[in-house]
Amino acid sequence: MADSEEESRNPPDPTDDLVTTSHTLTVKRRKLNYTATTGRLVLRQEVFTDGKFDGHLPKAEVFLTAYTLDDADPTQRPVTFAFNGGPGSSSVWLHLGLFGPRRVVSGDAGDLAPPPYGLVDNPESLLAHSDLVFIDPVGTGYSRAVKNEKPADYHGFQADLDSIGEVIRLWTTRNGRWLSPKFLAGESYGTTRAGGLAHHLQQRHGMYLNGLILISAVLDFASLDFTKGNDLPYSTFLPTYAAIAHYHGLLGDRPLAELLSEAEEFAARDYPWALSQGHRLSAEDRAATITKLASLTGLSEDYLDRVDMRVEHVRFYTELLRHRRQVVGRLDGRFTGWDPDYGREHWEDDPSFTALTGAYTAALNHYVRAELEYPNDLPYEVLSLSTHEAWSYKEFENKHVTVVDKLATAMRANPHLKVHVASGYLDGATPYYATEHVLARLQLPADLRENIEIAYYEAGHMMYAHEPSRVQQSKDIAEFIRSAANR
């Protein structure tokens, strides 16, 4: 009884609970034998009290899934560390949607798979070209702070870089991979994390990377945050509005490339000028601007006049198909859904998110137990709203969030660092033109600008939900890994 009470007061330190399983995957008649390592890694922190070292105390348990090819030379074999965004999202999307050796059967816009969904082999898996480590930040997936520690200590910009950077350092060290070509792959806020980590890993751990894979990038929040007084997002979202309206048949049968070229030209010159004029804008110029916007967005001139030529993105997704009693998706404008009230300004849910969440959640919860043999009774947090809402950007008080400076610094210090950017034309969360705007302003010498490549897809934020885009994107990233690995 005494021992039980003592353990209750002073529970034993948590330990890694990693599980290893063996698998095979066939890729173009080539049989890949690989090992999956799944479970939680204990993060520890050096603690000092009154200048005295108290030890490496456990702070958090971070869930990861690593896939390593058997019998590969670790000095030649690349490794890619992957995570999604949110902040507050687990890595399930990139894991079971694009990179992993197994992928979810979710269906696509207009042809969704019914529950209970399914899993299939992924012959386009990046595992054919790189080992993979999927990381769930604290508060997502099965990752949690340990007893008596505060989850909020990990829910912030720099704290997140510190913890994910430590996971990467630990895994690299324990698996003897310091001489492996190393890549980071992030999606959405995961690209913010990746840009910050490229700098952090260099500065804190002396770890220089070979490449970054930025999927649906957001490197500077000023390019897409509709905050009062910031007119920039109205321009950077305009080509995406045009792509979505075109997809839904509101702009005739013009080729998409031709339409986007026109929208980009207007967004670069005349539109921001008109917005900047305020009450100085003549009636004639205002009318011309509204007419042009209507031709590019599919919205009525009356509506555009009433919103003062400024269309916030969720208002657009609510308004565009109001006449059809439908709303369109933010993450992917190809998706449509229903709303209980077609008289309001903002839809109730993003139909592109709700359409895919069930499939990914079911697939992960089955896969991790049945195939990876990792038992855990905690709920797997696919997307933690509490983590998202608690996220701290205290490092950016009174200024917008950006990692543009950190990414540029990392690239200048490491001229071999290559960057692959993937953008979806119908991504209404991180618009492709905003990404172009930000990348054009990276403070890099001309020679280093050649280290950046951009790939475009006729799909949304998770462009791999669109089967042709998934197959093409897998090829594009595989080629990037081969090129940037310097082997």
Image (cartoon, rainbow, N blue to C red):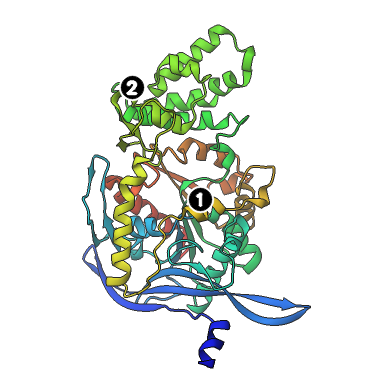
- Reading the chain from its start, which is encountered first: label 2 or label 1? 1
- The picture places residue 358, in percent across and down from the top left corner, at 30, 53
- The picture places residue 225, in percent across and down from the top left corner, at 55, 37
Q: CA distance from mark 2 to mark 1?
A: 32 Å
Q: Which residue lies at the image location 38% right of the left edge and 40% below the top edge?
A: 349
- The picture places residue 322, in percent across and down from the top left corner, at 34, 25
* Residue 472 image label: none
Is 412 rendered above or below residue 25? Answer: above
Is 304 rendered above or below residue 483? Answer: above
Residue at the far front: name it: 1
Q: Amino acid at mark 2?
A: Leu
Is 104 rendered above or below residue 32? Answer: above
Q: Amino acid at mark 1?
A: Tyr
Residue 305 falls left or right of residue 364: right
Neighbours of disc 2 within 10 Å: few (<14), some (14-19), many (20+):
some
Q: Nearer the viewer, residue 9 or 482?
A: 9
Q: Which residue is mark 1?
A: 189
Q: Which residue is mark 2?
A: 251
Q: Nearer the viewer, residue 274 or 263?
A: 274
Q: Which residue lies at the image location 63% right of the left edge and 14% below the top edge?
A: 279
